[in-house]
Image: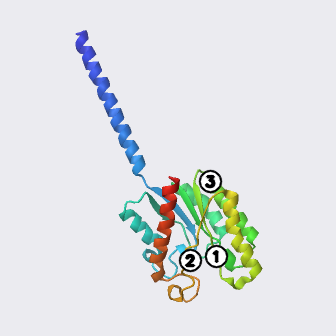
Amino acid sequence: MIKKSFFRLSILVITSIGLFFTYSSQARDNQISEPLSILILGDSLSASFGMKENQGWVYQLNQQLQQQKAPYILINASISGETTAGGLTRLPRILAKNNIDYLLVELGGNDGLRGFPPTLIENNLLQIIQLAQQKGIKVLLMDIKIPPNYGTRYNKLFNQTFTKVANISNIRLLPFFMESIAIKAELMQVDGIHPTIKAQPLIVTFMKQQLDSLIITVE
C-alpha cells in the first residue's frame, strides 16, 4: 500500500514538473514572439497629410512589417500641425494607454517653421525624452531640417538643436527621411513642405532600413 501511494505520488510530482516546464516554455516562446512596439510621435510628415491614412509611410511600413512577421510594429501618434509643446502635452496620455518599447520623436519642424526659439524646442524635446526614459522606454530622435529661408543664424541654431539633445540624452539620432526627397519637386506637394503619395514608398524603404538596423543592434 505504501509502495503504491509512493508510486502515485511520484507520478503526480513528475507530471506536475512536466506541466510546469511546458507552461514555462510556452510562456517564454510567447514572450519572445511578441513584437516590440515603436511609437511614432510626429507631425504631418508622419500623419499622411494630403492623402488617405493608408497611403502614408507609417501605415504602409506597418503593413509590410506585419506581413513579414517582423520583430517590431509601429503605433502612430502623429497629428498634423503638431509642435514639440503639443507632443509633450499629449505624451503622458499616450504612454498610459499603450505598452511601448521605443519612442521615435519626429517633431520640431512646425516649431522651426513658426520661428520658435531653438532653446524652447530643445527644452521640450528633453522633457519628452525624459518622460519616456523614466518609464524604461528607449528613445530615438529624428534630425529635423527646415528650409534655408529663415536666415543663416536661425537655421544653424535650429539644426544644432537635435544633435545637442541627442548627445545630452545619450540617444540615437536618426537621419531626416525628407532630406533626399525635399530636393526633388516631383516628390513634393505644391506647398513644398510635404511629400507626395509617390514619395511614401521611398520613406518606407528608408525608415525600414533605419529601424531594422536599430533593432538588430540594440536587441
Relative placement, left or right, of 13 versus 79 is left
Residue 11 seen by the camera: yes
Q: What number is the disc on residue 145? A: 1
Measured as percent of width and height from the top left, residue 88 is found at 65, 63
Label 1 CA crowd tier, 10 Å (few <14, some 14–19, many 20+): some
- Outermost residue toward the top? 1
**Disc 3 versus disc 2: distance between alpha carbons?**
27 Å
Residue 116 seen by the camera: no
Where does label 3 land, which residue?
A: 133
Measured as percent of width and height from the top left, residue 158 is found at 71, 73
Relative placement, left or right, of 84 versus 2 is right
Q: What number is the disc on residue 178? A: 2
Measured as percent of width and height from the top left, residue 137 is found at 57, 54
Is there a contact, CB below 8 Å, between mark 2 and mark 1?
yes
Q: Which of marks 3 and 1 is nearer the N terminus?
A: 3
Amino acid type, callout 2: Met
Q: Earlier in the sequence, mark 2 or mark 1?
A: 1
Q: Is residue 216 above or below residue 27?
A: below
